[in-house]
Image: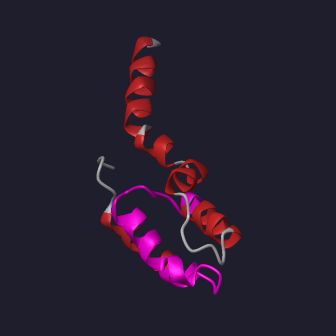
Amino acid sequence: MSTALNRSILGNLLYAVATKTTAATENRKKLLAEYVTAEKITSSAQLDLALEYLKGKAGVENIDTNDFDKSIGVSFSSMKPLINRINKGRSCDHR
């Protein structure tokens, strides 16, 4: 898969945003969809973390996006290409 999120994965994540939200997270669908399309959320596990976080913040008007990002691993997922390149280099060194 390239650095851009595969369309099928993107579609599945957006579908999950639409179907997995509950009454407690209904008002956050737009935020979740924005995170998916911006590739800040790139897996169903990460989406599940985001939903759990938002359930815990039900009734809170404004969430701390820095805390949200840390809780769902946004900074980690942006490092995946770097980690993959490092790991690929290591596996080549061991041959």
**94 or 37: which is nearer to us?**
37
Q: Quadrant of residue 92?
A: top left
Q: Residue shown at 50%/41% (left/top)?
A: 76
Judged from this view, the residue extending furthest toward the front is 61
Residue 39 point in image, percent of width and height: 37, 57
Judged from this view, the residue extending furthest toward the right is 56
Residue 40 point in image, percent of width and height: 42, 55
Residue 35 point in image, percent of width and height: 41, 63
Q: Residue shown at 51%/76% (left/top)?
A: 28
Q: Quadrant of residue 38?
A: bottom left
- The quarter of the picture where the C terminus appears is top left
**86 or 29: which is nearer to us?**
29
Give the total of numbered labels. Answer: 0
Region rendered in magenta = 18-46
Q: Does the magenta stretch include residue 27?
A: yes
**16 or 72: which is nearer to us?**
72
Q: Is residue 15 left or right of residue 57?
A: left
Q: Is residue 90 magenta?
A: no
Q: In this view, does 95 lie to the left or right of 57?
A: left
Residue 21 versus residue 90 in the image, above or below: below
Residue 34 point in image, percent of width and height: 38, 68
Residue 75 versus residue 8 in the image, above or below: above
Q: Residue shown at 44%/31% (left/top)?
A: 83
